[in-house]
Image (cartoon, rainbow, N blue to C red):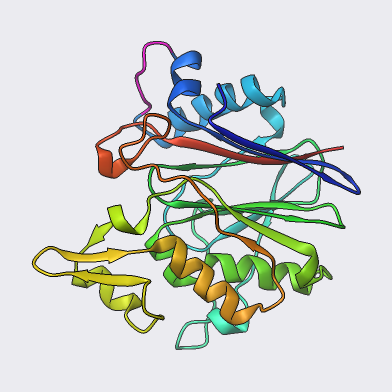
Amino acid sequence: MIEDSQVIEVPYGRIHTITLGKAAWTETFPGNSFPSDFESWSAATNIIVSKYTKIASDRIFSLNQVHNRDIGFVENGKISKWLPDPPSLLSKEGEELVQIDGSGDGLITFEANTALVIRTADCVPVFCYSKQKPMVALLHAGWRGALNGISEKCVHWLLGQGFMEEDLQVLIGPCISKKNYMVQWDVAQHFMSMPPGVVVEAPGLGYLLGVKEAILVKLRKEFNKLPLNPQSNDVFLSSRYFSHRSQDLGRNINIILWES
């Protein structure tokens, strides 16, 4: 069972955005056990994605997610390169952050029938596609990814490749809502300069942080023509989706692909 999906008609084919949650996992792995390392998660991801998309495993791509802003470009059946940081995201020393050991939190491809996958359990899946030219992208953004600008990095790179801002579409997938995401000052302090509503103090408890809201604020600040669809389902205490804050061990499998 697919918990969340859309099919979008575009001039070059059809875009599929999919989130597989608890029901899909139980149908695929009836014992309801979960992997404990990246290699096992990668293998399980290939099985469940192939089952629901009919895409061969050698056209399914996922990453060892580490909450950074590294984005891999998929072509010719492999991740051929890692996107450079735009000038606005360079470190204070003016140096680009270096991608390490094949880990990352985003994928982009211009190729048809190629499934890009990220796993989430509270964090925000950010889907992106072009309404005119062949391209799909998928990002994993927790609070660190939002803070470090993984979404802005993706859009900056696409604009540099000749895509038009108004022709892109960004969709937010199932994630934890602000009302259910309590953090402490060590995290909240990084978002206090954002507009009211991104962080709300809960006296005596901590701070409610809207990671989705932070991503949207940062995107709107830099790209005023970029179409954004912020609608998403809350995963916390959900019967449909996995949530780390709900003590779930599973992960939601988010997929984007374009079918030619």
Q: Which residue ends up furthest to the left in the rendered image?
A: 204
Front-most of residues 101 and 196 = 196
Q: Which residue is pictured at 74% across the width and 67% down the height?
A: 158
Q: Taking 201 as reference, is 73 left or right?
A: right
Question: Does the rendering let one see residue 244?
Answer: yes
Question: Does the rendering let one see residue 97?
Answer: no
Q: Give the residues drawn in magenta, as a range.
A: 30-35
Q: Position of residue 28 (x, y in %)?
A: 50, 15
Q: Does residue 4 sit above or below 66 in this rendering?
A: above
Q: Does residue 66 sit above or below 54 in this rendering?
A: below
Quarter placement of the N terminus: top right
Q: Position of residue 229 (x, y in %)?
A: 62, 58
Q: Does residue 223 sit above or below 231 in this rendering?
A: below
Q: Which residue is pictured at 30% across the width and 57% down the height?
A: 179
When asked about the image quadrant of residue 181, the answer is: bottom left
Q: Which residue is pictured at 54% across the width and 48% down the height?
A: 173
Q: Which residue ends up furthest to the right in the rendered image?
A: 11
Q: Position of residue 256 (x, y in %)?
A: 66, 42
Q: Taking 157 as reference, is 202 left or right?
A: left
Q: Position of residue 71 (x, y in %)?
A: 60, 58
Q: Which residue is pictured at 38% across the width and 34% down the height?
A: 37
Q: Taking 204 as reference, is 74 left or right?
A: right
Task: Considering the whole magenta stretch, tell me its main secondary structure.
Answer: loop
